[in-house]
Amino acid sequence: MRRRPLQCPFCDNYLAPPVDIHSKTIDVTGGICTCSAVYALDRAGHNLGEIFLEALGLACKGDLDKALALSPDRYETETFDYDIHTNTAARRENRRGKSGKIIFVRLKS
Ligand SMILES: [Zn+2]
């Protein structure tokens, strides 16, 4: 599948490349969309579980306790292959774990 510029899967906004975000509880490379979805980068595609938790924490504005207590029906999530050099993403298709991944999370209201 063709790579496309990084875009929010929930509202189709075009997004800036992930940046380093540090707070008391969060240490992640990602960003926040205007629709309140968040995204987080896993550079090597090896730490998806961990990065997913960071993204969830970011979606909860740094409240990791709240993030850990969320049940899966409270949020939506999407994962894409991501190329940081071109800021493009593609639907996950190959299972070779070489490329970076970008995880989107949006809390349901
Ligand atoms: Zn969005």
Image (tube, grey):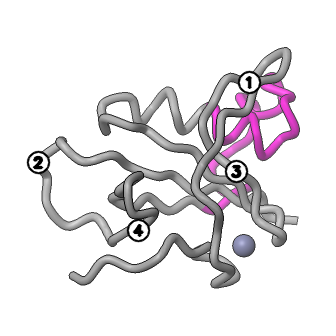
Decide which of tag 2 and tag 1 comes sooner along the chain: 1
Is disc 4 placed on a helix, strand or loop?
strand
Question: Earlier along the polypeptide chain: callout 1 or callout 3?
Answer: 1
* Residue interval drawn in magenta: 54-76
The three-letter code of the residue at mark 4 reads: Thr
Q: Residues within 10 Å of mark 1 (few under 14, many from 20)?
A: some
Quadrant in the picture for the N terminus: bottom left
Query: Nearer the N terminus, badge 2 or badge 3?
Result: 3
Seen from the viewer's position, the closer of residues 21 and 47 is 21
Which residue does the image show at 70% across and 50% down from the upper left?
Answer: 31
Dot 3 alpha-carbon crowd within 10 angstroms: few under 14, some 14 to 19, many 20 or more: many
- Residue 103 placement, left or right of 23: left
Secondary structure mostly seen in the magenta stretch: helix
Mark 1 or mark 3: which is in front? 3
**Left-right relation of 82 to 17:** left
Dot 3 beta carbon under 8 Å from ligand 1: no
Q: Check disc 3 and report its element: helix, strand or loop.
A: strand
- Which mark lies nearer to you, 2 or 3? 3
- The residue labelled by disc 4 is 88
**Residue holding disc 3:** 31
Q: Is residue 53 magenta?
A: no
Residue name at image x 47 percent, y 76 percent: 5
- Choose top left, top right, bottom left or bottom right for residue 109: bottom right
What amino acid type is highlighted by mark number 1? Ile
Task: Locate residue 101, reporting x and y percent.
Answer: 38, 49
Q: Amino acid at mark 2?
A: Arg
Residue 96's tag is: 2
Choose between 63 and 70: the one closer to the eye. Answer: 63
